[in-house]
Amino acid sequence: MNSYFSLAKDGNVMMDNDYNIELSRLNQIESVDIPHLKNVQMIVKDRVDSHSYDPIVYDHLKNLSDEPHLSNDLLELRAGTAPKDVPNIPYPDVKVDIKYTNELGRRVRYMRIYRKDNSTSSQKALVYLHGGAYYGGTVEDTLPFLRHLATKFNGIIYSVDYGLAPENPYPSGLEDCLAVLIEASNNHSQVSIAGDSAGASMALGVSQLSHTMGICNIYKHILFYPTVVHGSNHEGSLWNDHLIPVNDEQRRTLHNNYSQFKELDKIMTDFYIAGNNRDLSAPILSPLYADPMTFKKILVMTGEFDPFRLQDEAFVQKVGMAGCEAKYIRYGGLGHAFLNYVGRIPAVEDALNECALALN
């Protein structure tokens, strides 16, 4: 059992003083002016021990080899997207329904997640797209953190069970998500969209489709560590880990994680388009190249050491420079997929609180 929580006799997770003190500290950090991110409200929530990994994150990454190699085996890759050691935190006031939509002539499963005191006729909805590199992840993976979000959000969450690549290659998964977005817009007047990692990229693609097709106006885009570009130059500025300050003893781990993600970036793109000849610079595929005016209000949350950090900062600055409402929160010490540390790292709860605050 780690230092952030302990298990009570009745099975409930009880947060200890260290966790709550850190959560309170993070909540009090305000926006700062970062010269290289213009027209963006930026909040840097560093660790007290700045430019160093959170110990739990570092423990998961410190043994990466100097030349990390990812298998192309789909079963092995999918197993690697499954969250590990996620505490089972009960939320007795949160309800989860399994639903299906037949919009767009499809049949798409989704989970509807909400507080019991929230009517399903609430005017606010959030459509959520899980991560997993386009080929992995499940809606069940989202339950630990979306249940927590539901305790704070005054609306209904739709978590989409879209078809995974390569069995359902681009743009099939996007069409599944669009079908659920239509379902949500039929029932709610204020619809936002969110996602993590590849799911956040898909959320931006779905938003563009919704805008172009006149389906609904997306209220807010909440993006957890999105990947926003396919086919980028892995030796270019978007992947230069030497631009990231880090404790000297942990520099090698950061570099190895970036190297691992360069491999992952190519693998997930190959599975997503499934051998088809697609223009990787198309804005639906690579939202970095989209018309930023499509995204009127965005909140991007990324870890300090996430290999997607530099592309996230390029994206949020582009949206801010276009005159849209752009907010960026960077969490010190965290890497990719930090939502999977819910209940273990205080910064994750803070990020979910920021999400609810933006939506409410």
Image: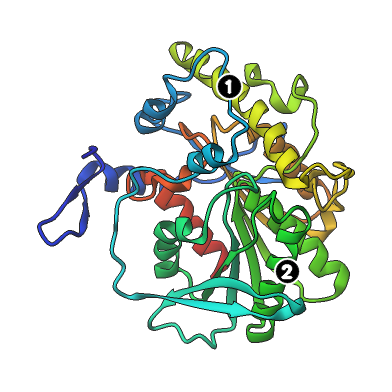
Q: How many labels, in total?
A: 2
Against 231, is 159 above or below? below
Regarding mark 1 in the picture, which secondary structure is present there?
loop
Figure colour scheme: rainbow
Against 79, is 137 above or below? below
243 sits to left or right of 279: left
Please give the residue where the numbered disc 1 appears in the rendered image. Answer: 69
Q: Residue at x 68, y 39 (%)?
A: 268
199 sits to left or right of 38: left
Q: Residue at x 48, y 11 (%)?
A: 248
Q: Position of residue 102 (x, y in %)?
A: 68, 81
Inspect the image, locate mark 2, and give the three-letter code of the amino acid beneath it. Leu
Q: Residue at x 73, y 69 (%)?
A: 178
Against 292, is 70 above or below? above
Closer to the observer: label 1 or label 2?
1
Q: Position of residue 230 (x, y in %)?
A: 78, 38
Please give the residue where the numbered disc 2 appears in the rendered image. Answer: 178
Q: Position of residue 350 (x, y in %)?
A: 43, 51
Around disc 1, counting alpha carbons within 10 Å, would you say few (fewer than 14), some (14 to 19), or many (20 or more)? few
Inspect the image, locate mark 1, and give the three-letter code of the amino acid beneath it. His
Q: Residue at x 57, y 14 (%)?
A: 67
Report whether residue 311 is seen: yes
Mark before the other along the chain sequence, 1 or 2: 1
- Residue 152: mark in rendering: none
Q: Position of residue 127 (x, y in %)?
A: 61, 68
Question: In which quadrant of the rendered image does the N terminus lie?
Answer: top left
Report whether residue 44 is seen: no
Quadrant in the picture for residue 85: top left
Question: In which quadrant of the rendered image does the C terminus lie?
Answer: bottom right
Quadrant in the picture for residue 162: bottom right
* Nearest the eye: 217 or 176: 176
Regarding mark 2 in the picture, which secondary structure is present there?
helix
